[in-house]
Each structure stands twice: as structure tokens, then as C-alpha cells.
Image (cartoon, rainbow, N blue to C red):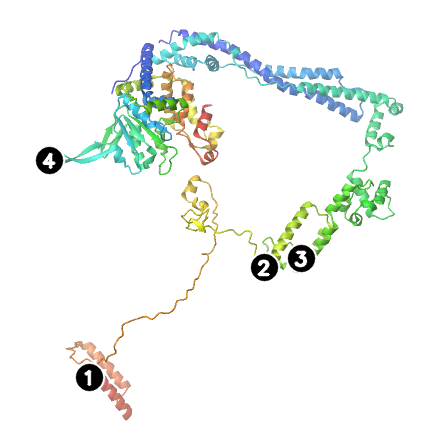
Amino acid sequence: MSSTLTVENSDQAREAAEEFKKVHTAIRTEVAKVMVGQDAVVEGVLAALFSAGHVLLEGVPGLGKTLLVSSISKVIDLSFSRIQFTPDMMPADIRGTNVLSENEGGGTKLEFQAGPLVANLVLADEINRATPRTQAALLESMQEKQISVGNRTIKLEEPFCVMATQNPVEQEGTYPLPEAQLDRFLFKLVVGYPTEEDYRTILRRTTANEQIELKPVSDAATIVQMRQVVRSVPVPEHVETAAIQMVMGTQPGTEYAGKLVNEVVALGASPRGVQSLILAGKVRALLEGRFAVAVEDLKAVAADVLRHRVLINFQGMSDGVTTEDIVAEVVK
Amino acid sequence: MSQGTAHPLSEAIEGVVRNASNQIEAFDKSRLVRNQIPVALQVMLAVPIFAVLAQAMRWYLGFASSPIIPWSGWAILTLLLPVGWVAARALSSQFHVDRLRAIRIADRQLSSSDRLETADDFLHQSEQDGFMKAAIEDAEKWAAKGQALDLTDSPEQNSGLIWWPVPVAVLILLVSFGLMQLERSFAAGSPDLSDGSGGDSTAAIEATPAQKRGKTEPEPKEEPEQPPATKPDDRSDKAVNRQGSAGSSIPDTAEESSGKLSEGETRESQQSANPSNAKGSPSASGQPSKAGDEKKRKKKTPKKTESKEREKKERKQEEKPSGATAGQGSSKGSDNNAAPSDWASTSQSATPDDEDLDEEDEVDDEEEEQESRGGVQPNMRDRRTPVNRDLQIGFGNNRPNPDANGRGGPGGQKKSRGVASLVLGVPIPDRVNGQPNKGRIRITQQRITPETEISDPTTVSERPAKENAVGQLHHPEFTPWLHDYVRRFFLQQRAKYPLNRNTDSSESSASSDASAGINESTLPAS
């Protein structure tokens, strides 16, 4: 992959930040041709893509989750694969397996046939419909960016991003994602219904003869470079402190946990939560035209970063407390 | 950037800190004063309250000539105390503004997204990359704004002054002043007190409590104001006097009351020797009881109810002669003890209230139910229908079964046991509603007419002896020791049962030996 980005003076930093905003705006504009509304979701998906994270999109059917991911793959010109998770899917179906093939001499040999996971952008559609065994096949690829099949380990090509979708309504016959899997997602974005004006635009675009062609405005190398720009953004000490206190505030029993957290939270955010907070904050700082992360960046991304890392206990569920309530109290 | 030369932004940030610190300190002081004003106003109430209490105490004890502190003194104290309170709090508090706090507040006021604090942090770092330098440069314009920042424009948190203690304090002071004036005029207008001691305070001590308690000669103007003997000790005294002998001294009021009791008083109040009845008797002042009270009393103890109740109790005692029947019939059991007691009579004499009447009604209902059951059946109220185990969707006759879901088995509570309840961690009580035994057994008898069974007939035939040769039989070869053993056995048998004991026996034994094939000659020689 490309070499590490060196930003020695402020001019280079300004150029890098400008380039980042330019690439982001180009992708955003192109995706907006097919994706009507859902600005926060699109921003979140792109932020996860630029900060080398994975996204879990949750929403009822028909809101354009799959369309968004496939559009991004076309716009960025990445290798894209879509996996429709089903209960009978096995880990080898997504990772790949060794198959027996004939060689030139007439003999046979075991050859690795890569699964759909070997791609830049992987859409794990309805991920909670697969069994935990199959879901667990994603763990290694999402964290270490590699696949181990037998004695073979395949390094996945950068950028690698898993964008999973799940339906919060149809829970019959689904397998909720384990905490280890949830923790690997940088964002959990809740896709809501469009506004009235968005509905009109959707109707005009989709029920006419108009065909929208998406053109690639970026590529994999640019995305990797932008990821390095994101990681170059410095974090002041007081922002680090704020991020740590936010995450510790979700963990019951700590000194920063409030009364609500101590009562209704069973499991708080992990250290991955702090990393995700800072990374997402860096992306937001660049988009806001700043060269360092501020506390307001952390507060802006806290809900998307922490909502799936906090586990509410039975008392909280019976009281109707949501993870958003917890995050709101922590951020307050 | 080298550490030796100070960055121009550092000086600008220091200027922001100085500016913000001064304003924050002033703001903190004003806020402290503002916060302490409501407290001081409430503290202000203590002076007039103390003045009123002191004056009332002095008045009660008779020191009515002149107050310790004049009215103007109390007023001045009332005004000075809150001022002194706020001044003391302000002087005892220390106002020190932290540097980071000053920068943070300046950042917040400027809405600069922590740019000043970030730049201050990066300036103190030894290594600065391009982004840090850019962040520092980015903060310069905000630092320039921060040096001229006016924090007074910020929305201050007005704690809401509480002004109600001021009029309350004034009112209390006025009351206190009025009390003093009233006391002075009272002391000046009473000739007895002035004649007795010439305005001496000791005379006032003796006179004032005596007037209040009324132990001296009653003044004519206080006579109608006296309540008609509402003290409980008076009533009890009267009751005791009524119970006592006629020779005892009876007060006039008691005599009047006893004379008028004959009209409106119930008979039981006169007959009762119980002090509680005496306490519940009508007013001891001797006034005739009002019609409302009489109605109420009649309502409480109607004679018809008493007679009916007595009849019921007698009938009940006839039905249940002893407490051994307790527990039969209703699950609530019987109220009677095994030993006969006179509780019924006491309950009749006691005045029943409304609750007792309600309980009586309930008892009547239970008695009727017991009578209808014959007093032997258990109470079926608590019996619940067993768990529906019907596999059908409906009850039949097109009646839907609300509990049946076609799957049979117990209801949702029973199904909620198991793994789901363990995961929730909430103990769910076992509420299986069913029968403890295996359930009802239904035996159905059917009448079936007997039917003849048809089978193939078997022909009867002889079974003669076998005619064909059996073939060569196997004769086992005795070993010498077995041969000798068998021989000795039979010799012992012969010695024990000789062959020629008599003719009949010899014949029979010979025939038996012959039939057995055992003969002396056939025995092998030893």
C-alpha cells in the first residue's frame, strides 16, 4: 500500500485537509444522486469508511440501506460483494474454501476459492439472519483484515469495510449479533423514514424513465490516503480526557458513571469505544475545517459510536431506558 | 518550532487568560452575593421572630413594663443582620480562577470549538507536526477576539431572588411592636394592678397568670365565653360522680346534666357503669342533647337491630352449640370459641358503628351460604379452574376458547419458566394451576352382545405305541469307580429293604425289582 503520510508544516496539513474535504464532498454529491435524504446516515457511512471502520445499518426494509452501500461501491470504484445472510449459510460460504481442481499434468490439487468476503466493500445484508457460527467468520476479517482458512491466511486488500444491515422488526428466526461482533462496528447508524419532501424526490426519480448512472469519483488508493490524513489529525489532551470519561461513564461502577448508568447498564463500552470516538471525531474535525479534535466532535459522534456498545439490563429494559438515553446522560 | 522563543500566540492566550480571569473573578463575586441574598433575607427573619418570642415570653412572665431592646433597635438589627451575613460570606470566600477554566470559558463564549485550549495544549508540546501548527495558526484570530472578550454579555444564571422574607419580617416586627403597645396600654388601663402594687412588676406576675388561668374570682365578662366544660377530666369526674353514691358532693353543672339526661339520654348511658360509656355520654354541661345527636345515636344503636341480632346469635348458637364445629363449612371458620362465652351479650351492649354493621351483613351472607350448603361442604370460592389442556381451538358449539391456542399444555406463565426466565434473572413464581393428583378418571362401560367364534374342528384319533424299532440305544460305559459306587448303593438298598421279608412283600418287592430290572444276578461282581 502507499507510504505513510508525512505532514511537516501547516501548509501541507491545510492541503491534506482540503483534499479530504474535496474527496468527501465529491463522493457525497455523487451518492446523493440516488440516495435521497438520509444525510446523517450517508455522512456516517462515509465517516466510517474514512476512519477504517465498519458500519452496522439498522432500519426497516425499504429505506435504501442496500442501495446506499452499493452506490458507494460504485462511486469509489471499489470491489464490492454482497452477501445475503441466511440461516443455512456456513462460514465457508463467505470466507471461501479449498476445492479440488485439476492441474495441467492431469493430477489434482487443492486450490483456495475465495469467498465473497474477499473484497473492498462487503455488504452483509441482514447479518442477523445467519447463525452465530457464520457471523463469527466475520470477526477475524473485521479486526485483523485477514482470513484464515486451514493453514492459509489471506490478507484482505485495503480499504476493507464491512457494511452490515439488519432489520429491527423481523426478529423471528434471527440471531442477535454477539457483543464481540457489535464492538467491531465503528458506527451503528439507525436509518429512519424520509421526510415528506424526500418522498416526492424518491417518487420522481424512481418511477420515471430516468436512469441514473453513477460514475466513480474516487478509488481505493485515494481512500487509503484519506485514511492516513484522518489519522494524522492530533488530539489535545483535554479531548482525550473527555473521550475516556465518556466511555468510562458508560461502565457501571466507575467514578464517571452516573446514577442511571449504575442502575440500568449491564455492560459498558470497551476500549474500542474510545478508539472509535477519537477516529470518528477526527473525521468530523476535518469536515468542520479544524485541524484538531474538539470535545464537540466527540459529542456529535457519541450516539453513533456508543449506542451498540452499551448493554441495558433487564431493569432498564423494563423501564424503557434506551442506549440513546444512556449516551445522552454520559455526553451531558 | 523552537521552545526558546515564545510563540506570539502564547502571549495572546495569556492576554485572554488575564482578561477572562478578571471578569470571571468579578462575576464569581457578584454571583456569590447574588446567591447569598436569598439566604440572608431568610436569616433576616430570625430577628423579628426572636423579638416576638422574647416579647411574648416577657409578657407571659409579667415583665411588661419595658422591652429589653426598643422597637427601633429590633428594626435596625433586622436590617443589619442580612448585610452582615452577605459581607461575612464574601470575605470568607476565596476567588481564584484556574487558567484552563479561563481559557475554556473564553472558548465557550467565542464558540471557537476549543481552538484556544487546543492551541495552548499544542504550544506546550515539544514536537509539533503540521496539523498542530495549523491548529495553532488557526487559533490566532480567536485569541485576538478573546483578548477583547466581554464576558458580561454572557447570560448569567440568575438564581431568582426571594423577596418574600422582607414583608414577612416587616409584618413580624409590626406584630411585635403591636404586642408591646398593647401590653403597655393594658398595663396602663388596669386599675387593680396599678392599685395593688403601683405598677410593680411582681404584681403583674401574680395578676396576669391568674387572669389567664381563671382561678381567682371569675370576671363577669369571661363567664359566657367559657366553654361549657369540655375538659376531659371534668367529664370523667362527672361520670365518676354519677356512678358514686348520692352522698358525695356533686357540682352544680353535674346536677343539671343529670337532671336533663332523662329526656334525651339513652337508657344505656345511664345504666352503664362502664367509664367508657360515661365518656361517650352526651355533653356533661347538662345541655339537652340535640335531635341530630339523638338520631345519630339511634342510628348507631337501634333496638330493632339489637333484637334481630340477638335472635341471630341465639339461632346461631342453637345451630352451633360448641366451637368444635369451627372450620366446617366456610374456610373462614367460626368466630365462636369452644367454651361458651358471653361475647354476644357484650357485643350487643357495645355500640356498633358502621363498620360493624357492614360486617354483620357479611356474616349474614355467609350464614345463608352455609345454610344452603348444609354446613358440611367446603368453601368453593377459592377454587380455580385447572389449567386448560384442551388441544381444540374452541369449546365446541362455536364458542371460542380464549386460553386454547391449539398447542395444548399450560398457559403462558408456565411456559415462561426455563431458559427464558433464567436469562432475565427474575424469579417467576410457579403458578401452575392444576390438580395435585393425576386428574379425573373417566370409566366408560359399553354393552356388547357376545358373538360366536368360528374355528376349525379337530378330529379325535388314537395314539398307539410306537411300532418301529427305536434303534441302538446308547449305553454309557461305567468307569470302575462308578461301577463300584452304584453296586454299593444297591447293596445298601437291599440290606435296608431285604427281598424275602415275607411272601407278599417278597413278591411285591421281587416284582418291583424285576420291573426295575435290578437283580442280584444282574449286579456285576465286585
Q: Which residue is mark 4?
A: A106
Packing grade of label 2 (10 A; few <14, some 14-19, many >=20) is some
Which mark lies nearer to you, 2 or 1?
2
Dot 4 falls on a residue whose secondary structure is loop
Q: Which residue is mark 1?
A: B523
Q: Which residue is mark 2?
A: B376
- To the question of a shared chain for discs 2 and 1, the answer is yes
- The Cα–Cα distance between marks 4 and 2, rounded to whole angstroms, is 97 Å
Residue situated in front as seen by the camera: B64 or B392:
B392
Q: Quadrant of residue B505?
A: bottom left
Query: Is the Cβ of the residue at disc 1 closer than 8 Å to that at disc 4?
Result: no
Which mark lies nearer to you, 1 or 3?
3
N-terminal-most mark, 2 or 3: 3
Q: Which residue is mark 3?
A: B316
Which mark lies nearer to you, 4 or 3?
3
Q: Amino acid at mark 3?
A: Lys
- The Cα–Cα distance between marks 4 and 3, rounded to whole angstroms, is 110 Å
- The Cα–Cα distance between marks 2 and 3, rounded to whole angstroms, is 15 Å
Residue B204 screen position, x and y as percent: 83, 25
Which mark lies nearer to you, 1 or 4?
4
Residue at horizontal 33%, vertical 15%?
A: A21
Residue at horizontal 39%, vertical 67%?
A: B448
Packing grade of label 1 (10 A; few <14, some 14-19, many >=20) is few
Residue B437 screen position, x and y as percent: 46, 56
Q: Amino acid at mark 1?
A: Leu
